[in-house]
Image: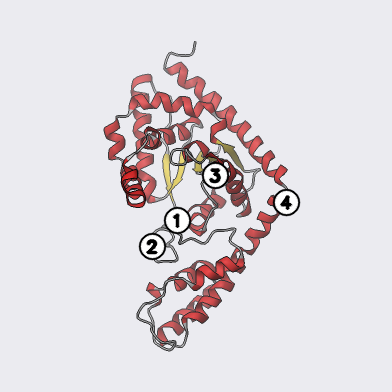
Amino acid sequence: MKKTILTGLRPTGNLHLGHYFGAGKNYLKMQNDYDFYLEIADVQALTDNFNNPEKVRKNVTEITIDLLSIGLDPKKVNFFIQSKIPEIAELTVFYSNLVTVARLERNPTVKTEIAQKKELFGNKGESITYGFLGYPVSQAADITAFDGEVVPVGEDQLPLLEQCREIVRKFNSIYGTTLKEPSAILSEVKRVKGLDGNDKMGKSLGNAIFLNDNEETIKKKIMGAVTDPNKIKKDDPANPDICMVYYYHNLVNKKENIEKICTECKKGSRGCVQCKKELVEAMNNFLKPIKEKRKYYEENPEIVKEILEKGTKKAKEKAEAQMKEVKKAMKIDY
């Protein structure tokens, strides 16, 4: 039997290149080898978007279309909406008794996100909600509700998975061996950098190319991308290794073109404007098949709705079966 894999994405906006190369390409491989459950994590999106529910609701459909557009097959992947699986919320409550506030505050991923909030929002970032702090507990419930054995993560998410493993061990030590400890599959691609050179491409950082960006938007973004600051004149030699335009050529252009670009850049026979225009063309060619699939699903919203309904139904059945075992172990199967 295939192992069960569980992963999720928060519907807070459309997917960008960072999502595609950091996660999406892995999903395309994994959908053939695992019993794949892909959660549209609307409840977790509300942990820091609780005052903007319209945004979360709209993006449930948007992010599903993005995922279908990159080639995920609904016959192989069970797309489901988190809020439609009440067993996850139940498990979150049960697990909240198994982890201390101090342990949650020490979680490196949580600490980093809190620091980012303070940087973005100043003193308002001090007001961290119970739901936000308990995010790792909710994530543990997501994974174990489906008896998840494998979880695809980036290195920055490993502390969250380790917290889940701790909760599983604590539960099993008290109530008897019931839950499986999930293992990680690390992304083969490190975090994709932003157009501004930032180590992270992010929705809130304004440095991302989204999978549904139109050609004019892509052109505008790329023409403003960071290049080698030491290249002043067109024929000055430059260092492609510190140029974000060359960095993105490596992601979306053909290998033979990349080698030519690198050589010309170092010789000083390539201007930045020319290089950016070529990247615009390569980027649009790369995104063209994704956009064509997106157009199909946008024009057939009933298909997207049916995919979510079918996937959610199957996820609900699996979570219900798991909850029976959990409640039996906890002696609350009245």
**The residue under label 3 is which amino acid type?**
Lys
**The residue under label 1 is which amino acid type?**
Gly
**Residue at 53 percent of width and 44 percent of height:** 11
Is residue 193 something that shows in the picture?
yes
Local packing at callout 2 (Cα closer than 10 Å; few below 14, some 14-19, many 20+) is: some
- Above or below, 100 against 34 in this view is above
Disc 3 versus disc 2: distance between alpha carbons?
26 Å
Q: Earlier in the sequence, mark 4 or mark 3?
A: 3
The percent coordinates of residue 329 (x first, y second) are 43, 18
Which label sits on residue 4?
A: none
SS assignment at label 4: helix
Name the residue that disc number 4 marks: 299
The percent coordinates of residue 226 (x first, y second) are 42, 72
Name the residue that disc number 2 marks: 198
Q: Earlier in the sequence, mark 1 or mark 4?
A: 1
Question: Would residue 16 appear left or right of 311 to someone viewing this image?
Answer: left
Disc 4 versus disc 3: distance between alpha carbons?
21 Å
Q: Earlier in the sequence, mark 4 or mark 2?
A: 2
**Residue placed most toward the observer, 133 or 122:** 122
The percent coordinates of residue 124 (x first, y second) are 34, 44
**The residue under label 2 is which amino acid type?**
Asn
Disc 1 versus disc 4: distance between alpha carbons?
28 Å
